[in-house]
Image (spheres, rainbow, N blue to C red):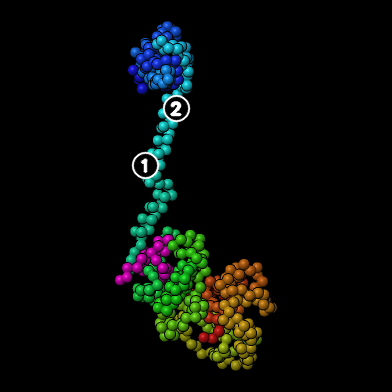
Amino acid sequence: MQNVDTTKYVIYADITADGIVERPDVVGAIFGQTEGLLGSDLDLRDLQKTGRLGRIDVQITSSGGKSTGTISIPSSFDKVETAILAAALETIDRVGPCIARIQLNKIEDVRASKRKYVIERAKRILGEMFEENILETEEITEEIKQCVRVEEITHIGPDKLPAGPNVLDSDAILVVEGRADVLNLLKYGIKNAVAVGGTNVPSTIADLCAKKVVTAFTDGDRGGELIVKELLQVADIDYVARAPEGKCVEELTQKEIVRSLRQKIPVEQVLDLYKIKPQPKRRRDLAAKRKSLIREKPLCIRNVTPVGPRVEAAHPRPEVASHRLIQREVLAPRVIAPPVVQHPAPEIPVVAVAEPEPLSEQVEWFRPHVDELNGTLTARLFDRNQNALRDVAVRDLARELKDSNGDVTGVVFDGVVTQRLLDIAAEKGLEYLIGAKMGNIAKSPVGVKVITKEL
């Protein structure tokens, strides 16, 4: 009998007989005509008894007085002995009373067939059973981070608005559109964002905006523009940042988020851009007063005395300016000195004081530039001789100043003087900034004069 556990090769041969023969005739011919041909070690009967040779399978049919069929013999010998057995089959020339011819067809390596089957089956197993369970290292990390971000999301107010964990404790917050935006910002460590949840701004957002420094961070599409317009009407926001055109906040990378927030613009410029009527003065003053409590330092503004020849007087006199253009300088917070005890002093004669040159004459040179740029949202850069160098858009002014090589000493622009512009102007050694309005300034660098239109 065939021992399937030890079979290495299978011999396949074709048989043709000139007459009608059957399977027992073919098997008897194989055993009878090979007996003693290969010696006692390769006697087919003994090999079958010991399991070294498998069962001889014969498939034969008769037609037209002739018989044809196939013979298969399993073998557990090595290649050499199996080849000898295969060659011995071709020596058989008679089956029963009929002349017959046996032609070797092929010798199949059973182990190679098994290996091929194992490979094909392993491929199917890998694709069908492991496809949904395999996770790369990045996928595992991202899945864990996603769980942590979901746990960090809180819900504030009666409207249960999705928000980061630091919204209520932070002095400055970001107002975004939806929960996915909050999740994306949490992914990069920004935990002070709150979502409005649609174009209908809830009262919770309005209450938060009245107490904190607010930046509206919306998508770069039509929906984001509508949300900005509604926030400008119902809430007190300070800055507006937009995602790049056609992109959503939820799909921005960390670099794109940082770039968008750095390019935020003050709310005054947005009001002019969308032609929205500003809030009533009383309401604006109350909001500014509340937010001043969370600023770094209080703002102190005074008129700067015009540059011109003067002689120190014993008793300086106050000056009141009522011109259309007022020059202002932002100073550090006042330090209250301790009271000084007055002692009698000898009378000092009054020295004549030279009359200072009027402020309107001092700033007369840039009036035409201010009038020309009014309503254009354009900035004009000047050199030391007050010659115009070039015009740029206000939104590109900060980048233009950063890229300047020291040739720019002053700027006249139709926009709001912001803290960022002041810091860049001080870094680049500018002497003056002439803008339309003064923004929220916490501290002003020394040496940069600020001139604005009168409100």
Res 291 → quadrant:
bottom left
Residue plotted at (45% across, 12% down) = 99
Q: Quadrant of residue 450?
A: bottom right
Residue 331 x %, y % = 52, 78
Is residue 312 depicted above or below 424 in this figure?
Answer: below
Q: Which mark is residue 404?
A: none
Instruction: State the residue at coordinates (38%, 46%).
Output: 132
Query: Can residue 454 be seen by looking at this rendering?
Result: yes
Q: CA distance from mark 2 to mark 1?
A: 25 Å
* Residue 442 on the magenta segment: no
Quadrant (top left, top right, bottom left, bottom right) of the N terminus: top left
Q: Which residues are magenta?
A: 157-184
Q: Earlier in the sequence, mark 2 or mark 1?
A: 2
**Amino acid on which disc 1 is placed:** Met
In the image, residue 18 sits, relative to residue 293, either above or below, namely above
Front disc: 2 or 1: 2
Residue 307, given in percent of the width and then of the height, sits at 62, 84
Q: Is 172 inside the magenta-drawn segment? A: yes
In the picture, measured across the screen, residue 21 lies left or right of residue 396, that is: left
Farthest left residue in view: 158
Q: Residues within 10 Å of mark 2 (few under 14, many from 20)?
A: few
Q: Count up the numbered dots.
A: 2
Q: At 36% from the left edge and 56% from the top edge, which residue is drawn?
A: 148
Say whether residue 78 is visible.
Answer: no
Identified by mark 2, the residue type is Ala
Mark 1: secondary structure: helix
Q: Which one is in front, 44 or 273? A: 44
Q: Residue furthest front?
A: 64
Question: Residue tagged by mark 2?
Answer: 112
Instruction: Please give the label number shown on residue 129.
Output: 1
Left or right of residue 401: residue 46: left
Is disc 2 placed on a helix, strand or loop?
A: helix
